[in-house]
Image: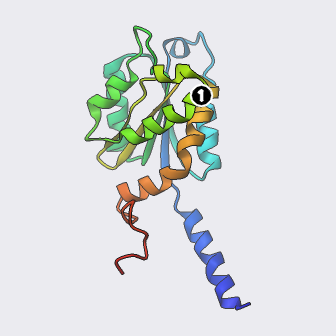
Amino acid sequence: MDIRRKEKKAKSKVEKKEQRWKAAVVTLSDKGYAGEREDKSGPLLCGMLEEAGYEVTEVRLLPDEQKMIEQCLCELADEKKVDLIATTGGTGFAPRDCTPEATLAVATKNAPGIAEAMRLASLQVTPRAMLSRGASVIRNQTLIINFPGSPKAVKENLEAVLPSLEHGLAILTGNASECGKPVSEGK
């Protein structure tokens, strides 16, 4: 075996690990914000993202108030310059659930495939997954994904989309080839 080859492979793995995406986790819950319910989904999202190599730089807990959510998403994307905003909660049919509306209001581009993939994966577990209204969008160079509010659904949904997020973020930030073209093509 050629030792140089081994060294090259090891070096590329290290370089890949050094690319850490900055993420923000935002929990939307009236009861959580009022201190009436412990937030379990936000910390779960943080832990799973960190385990996957993301650097969670911002964690927020907000009530289901559309304007507050919009302001928070804009601040995280435009001022804090995070690569990924993962929200949890506010995606159902309850009268005050407004996370998708706030997310769509601040979007510069739609990215529906991510939310569709989450619903598709969840439908394998429960037919009620069709009731999720979560959205996935882009605001400038930030990807925003709405996850459900329950810890079980957060885990299932993040596991469904996590393998593709890194490539999507690389494209969004100008650090990768297009989805349909391997990096070696066109050189």
Residue 184 place in picture, x, y as percent: 43, 76
The residue located at (36%, 38%) in the rendering is 112
The residue located at (31%, 21%) in the rendering is 67
Viewer-closest of 44 and 6: 6
* Residue 2, picture quadrant: bottom right
Please identify the residue farthest to the right as the structure is shown: 1
In the rendered structure, the answer to whether residue 149 lies left or right of residue 109 reads: right
Viewer-closest of 152 and 181: 181
Tell me the quadrant of the picture where the C terminus can be found: bottom left
* Residue 35, picture quadrant: top right
Residue at disc 1, secondary structure: helix
Q: Which residue is mark 1?
A: 153
* Residue 173, picture quadrant: bottom left
Residue 7 place in picture, x, y as percent: 66, 83
Q: Is residue 59 visible?
A: no
Tell me the quadrant of the picture where the N terminus can be found: bottom right
Amino acid type, mark 1: Ala
Q: Which color scheme did the rendering employ for the protein?
A: rainbow
Asked if residue 70 is positioned above or below residue 168 in the image, the reply reads: above
